[in-house]
């Protein structure tokens, strides 16, 4: 199945920041916070979104922003542009 966001929305695949600490302590899933960084998978139809984001961009988004969805047993978020705080440039 493929999802194409409408208007000023983007489809993001959340990514884990780190599964263990620098000292080697593994953080269990129950103690982790929700990811706030993700990779842009699809872009909406609004011109401002097409100009601001590209597929493959990494973004930082509001902790409780967007809607959680599951597609083919993978977790995604649909975010409005206002939920995106920054684009991450490495």
Image (spheres, rainbow, N blue to C red):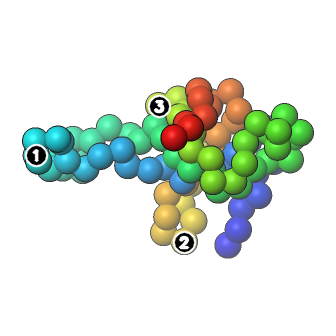
Residue 66 image position (x, y, % from top left): 59, 38
Assign a secondary structure to mark 1: loop
* Above/below status of 56 relative to 79: below
Looking at the rendered image, the disc whose residue lies closer to the viewer, 2 or 1, is: 1
Q: Residues within 10 Å of mark 2 (few under 14, many from 20)?
A: few
Which residue shows up at 64% across the image and 40% down it? 79
Q: Earlier in the sequence, mark 1 or mark 3?
A: 1
Disc marking residue 25: 1
Residue 39 image position (x, y, % from top left): 56, 50
Disc marking residue 12: none
- Give the farthest residue toward the front: 90
Q: In the visual, does 81 lie left or right of 90? A: right
Q: CA distance from mark 2 to mark 1?
A: 31 Å
Residue 9 image position (x, y, % from top left): 73, 42
Assign a secondary structure to mark 3: loop
Q: In the visual, does 11 lie left or right of 70? A: right
Q: Mark 1–mark 3 contact, CB under 8 Å?
A: no
Q: Mark 2–mark 1 contact, CB under 8 Å?
A: no
Which residue shows up at 84% across the image and 34% down it? 48
- Which quadrant of the rendered structure holds the N terminus? bottom right
Which residue shows up at 69% across the image and 53% down it? 55
Q: CA distance from mark 3 to mark 2?
A: 24 Å
Q: Which residue is mark 3?
A: 63
Regarding residue 64, the answer to whether it shows in the image is: no
Q: CA distance from mark 1 to mark 3?
A: 24 Å
Name which quarter of the figure residue 46 lies in: top right
Q: Which residue is mark 2?
A: 72
Looking at the rendered image, the disc whose residue lies closer to the viewer, 1 or 3, is: 1
Which residue shows up at 89% across the image and 39% down it? 47
């Amino acid at each position: 199945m493929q999802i194409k966001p409408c208007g000023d929305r983007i489809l993001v695949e959340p990514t884990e920041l780190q599964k263990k600490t620098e000292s080697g302590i593994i953080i269990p899933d129950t103690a982790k916070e929700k990811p706030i960084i993700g990779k842009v998978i699809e872009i909406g139809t609004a011109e401002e979104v097409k100009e601001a984001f590209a597929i493959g961009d990494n973004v930082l988004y509001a902790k409780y922003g967007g809607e959680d969805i599951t597609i083919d047993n993978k977790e995604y978020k649909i975010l409005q542009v206002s939920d995106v705080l920054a684009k991450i440039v490495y």
